[in-house]
Image (tube, coloured by chain):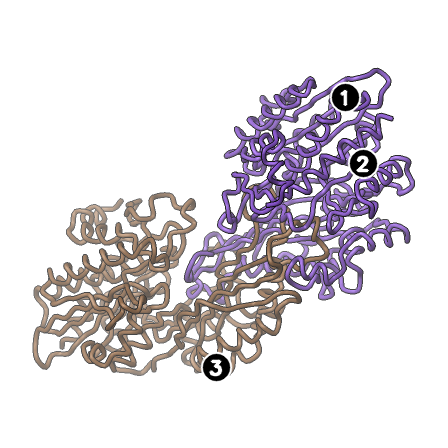
Chain colours: A purple, B brown
Amino acid sequence: MNAETAEWLKSNDSKEYFELLRIPTVSSQLTDHLRDLVSCATWLRAWLRSIGAEAELVLPQGAAASGGCVVPVVFGELKRAEGAPTVLVYGHYDVQPPDPIEKWASNPFEPTVKGDRVYCRGAQDDKGQFFSFFCGLREYLANGKPINLKFVLEGQEECGSETLFKLLEDRAFRQKIVADTLLVCDTSAAADLRPAIVAGLRGVNHFTVTLSAANRDLHSGEYGGIAPNAAQGMAELMASLHNPDGSIAVSGFRDGIIAPTHEELSAAEAGLMDAAGYAKDIGTEPCGGQRGKSIAQRNAFEPTIEVNGLHSGYGGPGSKTVIPCEAIAKLSTRLVPGQSPKLAYEAVKRHLKDHCPKGMSVELGELTGEAPGFRLPLSSPLFALAADLLREIDSRGAVFQWDGASIPVVSALREATGAAPLLVGWGQSEDCIHSPNESYSVRQFLRSREWAMKILGGLAE
Amino acid sequence: MNAETAEWLKSNDSKEYFELLRIPTVSSQLTDHLRDLVSCATWLRAWLRSIGAEAELVLPQGAAASGGCVVPVVFGELKRAEGAPTVLVYGHYDVQPPDPIEKWASNPFEPTVKGDRVYCRGAQDDKGQFFSFFCGLREYLANGKPINLKFVLEGQEECGSETLFKLLEDRAFRQKIVADTLLVCDTSAAADLRPAIVAGLRGVNHFTVTLSAANRDLHSGEYGGIAPNAAQGMAELMASLHNPDGSIAVSGFRDGIIAPTHEELSAAEAGLMDAAGYAKDIGTEPCGGQRGKSIAQRNAFEPTIEVNGLHSGYGGPGSKTVIPCEAIAKLSTRLVPGQSPKLAYEAVKRHLKDHCPKGMSVELGELTGEAPGFRLPLSSPLFALAADLLREIDSRGAVFQWDGASIPVVSALREATGAAPLLVGWGQSEDCIHSPNESYSVRQFLRSREWAMKILGGLAE
């Protein structure tokens, strides 16, 4: 542990950050974690009030009655000066499930410091990212020029942003969050923490595929050679989604894709690790996606269809001689500008129906996301300001990135508020977000804190 | 409930049978169930002693020290007359796991009578089958002609018969179980309980396939298009095992297969349901196996490769945006005469290694079974005796069957004892063995009981 970490561990910042991390806000497991999500939202409301903001938990009209939309959005507002610009800060307080829990070296919901990193689910994504920014923001407020702030913190980013999307349908809520600039603290820096401005995000659809065969699991001896096998069928169905060269085999899925400009492509290539870097990072050949396209093309400007989960039949120790009657797959598709989320989903659905193995039936459900990809113009004044400030923080200056990940709600917030989005974050691949042993370094925390002070100062000018 | 069931429920037979069923002897989950397995073996030893047999629990020499072979075989012997024939009765007291437990209408380890059926894991396979035979045997002993009996009841048939196979390597044990006839109570009758003599069984190999890609689960946005996906890879690998016409695509796997004789094929076809019957039974088209071959060919005389389980990544509610780094598949292959279990396994292994997707590595483990298929000659005197006795029980007479299932230890027992095997059982497809809500009817129980008295009488002549 270095001196910086030792110092930071004594601060109020780290104390509060650890409190926030201890609340297990797993939004996709609502039955188990709704109480935690509400408790976390309440904690954040209190925190915003502690820095002088008005803050409230918001749910759509009639949400409780309808049985949906029960995870509140925390909305906060701090008016400092009529006429000064208004900045909307977005973050999310929910986290991914900790599974597989057995692969964690420490309790996934107890912040554990090792070296100069904090290990915990959410340490980075997104509690660490937005809360470190908040700590900088608090310090800025003490001495900086007047600026008006608004906050939107949601608790369902990891599973489709249901409440926030519903709220955005409401004119009064849209009015409330109008701003000049939208700051998003949920993205990554380039390698070795070189600053990055995200100039584009992929969109996303998530859904569950269920394949049904016989009316029950069958004995693999008695019925082997007679009954169709749902596990085998699902394997064939999933294999049919891609061609042998790794390209997507779903007809109509790629319709309308807008190719990147030469400027975008070269900037994206400059901002990513090379194949050797990725090989070292992930421990195997970075051979996902279509052969013959560069890593930047495949990750930033090409869509994907990923199998996020595949489950059928027996999975315990030893054997169970069964022909499974059902199989499920969790699928997600990342989408790029020009693709319609609706039409891309329909194309996959049609493909799965058309390729459904004999004797089986396929159903799709649990569709969430439905977010388009977007790209921002490289030549905006906001990007120029951010680039200048980031060079003050790091003499290497900023790179532009087209992140392969998605924050579906960013497109929606941009549309609803009219604000110019600025996505600068400090994630690194070694943070292992969405994986066991997620972590965030003190260096990242302090970098994010510094960025908050710089950008608020820049925008207040 | 009919009068026969009401009567039977008052009997000592049903009381003891329910005791036996309540012991959750899941052999593939040894950590949780070893105590139950030993307790069940002890119960059976007491039962055998109660009918006058000497009985003991047997483990291989030095088994405890070596850490393996901890599930005892129950061996019993009842000598009634020098010179009279010796009959060895085989059964197994272990059962399949009850998963998926949520699909059971009653507790899987509490015998529950509905109508004229008993619902419980093991109600049929194999506790119900061998214990109903035992009840007939007990009655036979009271009045029948002298006969010498031996009993081998094992507790690992569902997961590879480790202890019994180990014991069969021991000359002294082989000596102990020498017999003239081997009676096996673990097979099925034809439709509507028409008696069936099993003239052949398929062999089996079980094993687990593990496919590894990156060094951790990865975010499907950040790494989508870059990292290889183990779930997708496993789907491709499993899909590669079969050709589009349902035939097996593994080179070398079918080497040496002995085709059935015309007599065997027509007898097998007569003994099975037709496609419409199977469609009704399983609730979908019986389209497993290779197109263009008959159901009898596919189930009795052709090998299979079945995916018994497929697991990778997230499977809970909602979504988790992950690129899984690992996938496992549980595979079993059913084997027919002429196939070497060892070479067939090697062929699959070679295929999986050869087809391993880029950026991934594949490992095979947990190999059990390794049992060849066998067929018995239709023209033996034992088959003629059995056929005559079965016609006395049921005027339709017996059919010959080549069961698609496997009892690996039968081939081994046959070889070790020199006994002529006779496999007659009373299973029906509606028993749902290996599935949720396994059951056995009182009619089946009484049929099996009657068969025991008949065949022991016939063999004692």
Q: Which residue is mark 2?
A: A422
Residue at x 79% of width, y 40% of height = A393
Where is the N terminus of chain B found, in terms of image quarters?
A: top left
Residue B264 horizontal/vertical position (percent): 41, 78
Q: Give B218 or B273, whichever is nearer the viewer.
A: B218
Inter-mark Cα distance, 3 to 2: 68 Å
Position of residue B422 relative to residue A265, above or below, is below
What's the CA distance linking mark 2 and mark 1?
24 Å
Question: Which chain does the numbered disc 3 sit on?
Answer: B
Residue tagged 1 = A171
Q: Residues within 10 Å of mark 1 (few under 14, many from 20)?
A: few
Which residue has dot 3 on it? B257
Left or right of A392? Residue B116 is left
Circle 2: residue type: Leu
Is residue A349 depicted above or below B130 in this figure?
above
Q: Earlier in the sequence, mark 2 or mark 1?
A: 1
The reply to whether the C-beta atoms of the residues labelled 2 and 1 are less than 8 Å apart is no
Callout 3 environment at 10 Å: few (<14), some (14 to 19), or many (20+)?
Answer: some
